[in-house]
């Protein structure tokens, strides 16, 4: 079995921006603090337990993008709070 490639947080940041999420929203979805998320963006390595959780959430977010065509027009027009609430609803319904 080949070892997993480290996550490329430049790509994670691109995903975050495309999905119209704030850094705080993305950190919350990944289950970490903003400071931890910023550390990862700057190149800090993830702990093994975090790595698995982050990869699972990133797969879910990519699924929302493809399956639900995120961000759809009503999401683009929504406030940041409404946008995150809608995303969480979708994530919970897809579980």
Image (spheres, helix red, strand yellow):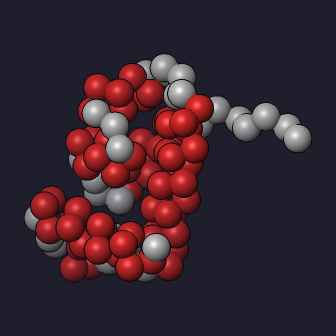
- Figure disc tally: 0
In the image, 79: left or right of 73? left
- Residue 17 at least partly seen: no
| Residue 36 x/y as whole percent | 35, 27
Where is 55 relative to 32, above or below?
Answer: below
Where is 72 relative to 10, above or below?
Answer: below
Q: Residue at x 54, y 54 (%)?
A: 56
Where is 60 relative to 11, above or below?
Answer: below
| Residue 80 x/y as whole percent | 15, 59
| Residue 93 x/y as whole percent | 38, 79
Quarter-of-image position of residue 27: top left
Residue that protrudes farthest toward the right in the picture: 1
Q: Residue at x 36, y 72 (%)?
A: 92
| Residue 26 x/y as whole percent | 32, 47
Q: Nearer the viewer, residue 51 or 82?
A: 51
Q: Nearer the viewer, residue 57 or 71?
A: 57
- Residue 15 at least partly seen: yes
Q: Quadrant of the N terminus?
A: top right
Q: Nearer the viewer, residue 82 or 88?
A: 88
Quarter-of-image position of residue 20: bottom left
Q: Residue at x 29, y 46 (%)?
A: 28
Q: Residue at x 13, y 61 (%)?
A: 81
């Amino acid at each position: 079995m080949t070892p997993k490639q480290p996550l490329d947080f430049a790509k994670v940041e691109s995903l975050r921006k495309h999905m119209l999420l704030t850094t705080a929203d993305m950190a919350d979805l990944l289950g970490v603090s903003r400071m931890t998320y910023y550390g990862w963006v700057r190149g800090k390595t993830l702990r093994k337990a975090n790595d698995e959780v982050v990869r699972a959430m990133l797969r879910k977010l990519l699924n929302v993008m493809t399956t639900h065509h995120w961000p759809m027009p009503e999401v683009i027009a929504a406030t940041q709070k409404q946008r995150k609430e809608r995303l969480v609803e979708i994530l919970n319904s897809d579980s």
